[in-house]
């Protein structure tokens, strides 16, 4: 008898945020489904975040609260 296997859940589901410079949509990972992504043009010294780039080459940070 074979055991059925399932893939583990995707722990890096994504969402779309707007670039703060040009408003273009950018897909970013979200580490926790309860996390609320907050976009910033400045980097902070601490906190769970990722660096994102839009198709126009703008760099910005997405923080998860």
Image (cartoon, rainbow, N blue to C red):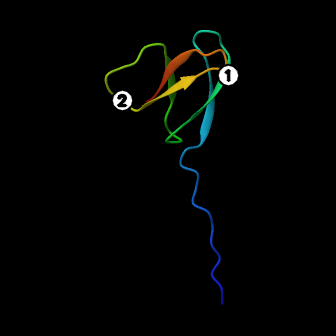
- Is 54 above or below relative to 2? above
Q: Which of 43 and 17 is in front in this view?
A: 43
Spot the residue most to the front: 57
Residue shown at the point (36%, 20%) measured from the top left: 44
Residue at 61% across / 38% down in the picture?
14
Element carrying mark 1: strand
Q: Residues within 10 Å of mark 2 (few under 14, many from 20)?
A: few
According to the picture, the residue beneath numbered tag 2 turns out to be 47
Rendering coords of residue 37 (x, y %): 52, 28
At 66% from the left and 15% from the top, the residue drawn is: 56
Residue named by callout 1: 25
Residue 29 lies, in percent from the top left, at: 56, 37
Compute the Cα span from label 2 to label 1: 23 Å
Between 15 and 57, the residue placed more toward the observer is: 57
Image coords of residue 13 (percent x, y)? 59, 43
The earlier-in-sequence mark between 2 and 1 is 1
Which disc number belongs to residue 56?
A: none
Residue 6 in which image quadrant? bottom right
Q: In which quarter of the image is residue 23?
A: top right
- Seen at 66% across and 90% down, the residue is 1
Q: How crowded is mark 1: few (under 14 residues within 10 Å), some or many (20 or more)?
A: some
| Quarter assignment of residue 19 | top right
Q: In this view, does 34 lie above or below 58?
A: below
Q: Which residue lies furthest to the bottom in this view?
A: 1
Classify the position of the C terminus by image quarter.
Answer: top left
54 horizontally vs 48: left or right: right
């Amino acid at each position: 008898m074979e055991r059925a296997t399932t893939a583990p859940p995707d722990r890096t589901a994504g969402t779309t945020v707007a670039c703060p410079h040009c408003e273009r949509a950018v897909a970013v990972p979200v580490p926790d489904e309860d996390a609320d992504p907050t976009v910033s043009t400045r980097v902070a010294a601490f906190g769970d975040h990722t660096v994102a780039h839009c198709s126009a080459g703008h760099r910005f940070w997405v923080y998860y609260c």
